[in-house]
Amino acid sequence: MIKKILLTLSSTWLILLALPASAAWYEVTGSAVVLQSESQARQSALEDAVLQVIRYSGADLSSFNRIKPYLKNSQDTYQFSGSELRQITVTKSKKRSGSLYLTAQIEVFPSARTCHKVQYKKGLLLGEFNIRSPQHASLGGVYQLGNNFTSVLKRQLETRSQSFVVSGTTRVQINPGYPSQMVMLAEDNDAQYIISGQITDLTSTLDQKLLRSDKINRQFAAELQLMDGKTGEILMQNQYREVANWPFSRTSQVDTSSARFWQSSYGQAVQRVSQNMMLDLESTLACRTNLPEVVRHHGNTVHINQGRKHGVKQGDQLALWHSAGFIDQNGIPRNRMVQTEITLVVDRVYEKSAELSIEQPELANSIQPGDLLTKQMED
């Protein structure tokens, strides 16, 4: 007998069609505003549907980028191997009020061993995005868009990512040329990684119509840079670009913190950029080891700089690594870890920290602040 459970997610419907032991079928409706073409809207709506299912089912979000290129093809059925998403079948689509609504049935085989389920969440320090060429912001007076985009990306990471928590935001200039300073900045914010970026293009073009009102198309391009907070090393540099209709008057001043802006076709394009950034970070970092750090040691008790918001739970077991890093002759920090025979168990958990007891008390004297830990996988 097939069970049906009706749920509401973000004003769209998601139906759980079946609940076998190892797999589940979901029926979900995704939506997208028709901007440039119906094919692009179809792809966006399908991506929206797939992401909803991934979040609800607990499947691995970092796997989305591996199947995303195939969703550009307009077909009724997609089949995948080596992924928790096995099959996507588009059952219907319709346009209404300038938006495309697409319904799909999606088969998911969730795994209990995916990275975000066996790792603690990693702390990210988010630098403020600025507008590289302020004159690009003159149309609409959107000079605060950099600050607003930083807030949108922060919200994406806090509410939709599986592998991260935002340790904080900073107005300090992120400069990869000074890795030792970047390491100190990360330490001050309990962050394992640092994110910085710029908005690089806000230019617009006028599409003149003979029988209709002129249409303004506007670019939104940004670059993202990811740094390792333990070494200052650059791990990723990506460029992003969207173009969308600018629906506002050429003479009006636009409030980029208003719902009117973010619900517009241009505001939604900007949000897609923040979503793509979050997905790329998931793909790059989800399976990298999370490294809680010893911040205090007293007797048989150790305090670490991660807690409930990172996913730490009472009873977790962790292995201790001595930090043996050094700075080379060029002033570049070289991270090095040496595994010990010491294991610890979480006794008390707080929001951003935890207390652990040492299982080998005779080795406790070798533990120092700055030593790192790794979560041991459950059998």
Image: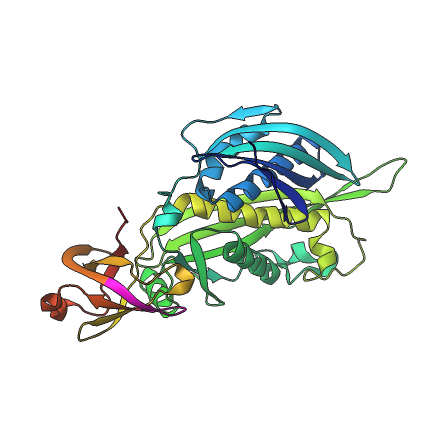
Q: From the viewer's perspective, is 32 left or right of 336?
A: right
Residue located 66% across and 62% down the image: 143
Q: Which residues are magenta?
A: 345-354
x and y, in percent, of residue 320 in the image:
20, 59
Q: Residue furthest right?
A: 211
Determine whether 243 is above or below 187 in the image.
Answer: above
Q: Residue furthest bottom?
A: 298
Residue 352 drawn in magenta: yes
Marks counted in the figure total: 0
Residue located 63% across and 49% down the image: 270
x and y, in percent, of residue 118 in the image:
34, 49
x and y, in percent, of residue 133 in the image:
60, 56
Determine whether 73 is above or below 220 in the image.
Answer: above
Image quarter hosting the N terminus: top right
x and y, in percent, of residue 70 in the image:
53, 28
- Of 43 and 216, which appears nearest the observer? 43
Q: From the viewer's perspective, is 205 left or right of 235?
A: right
Residue located 20% across and 56% down the image: 337
- Of 25 and 61, which appears nearest the observer? 25
Residue 130 in view of the camera: no
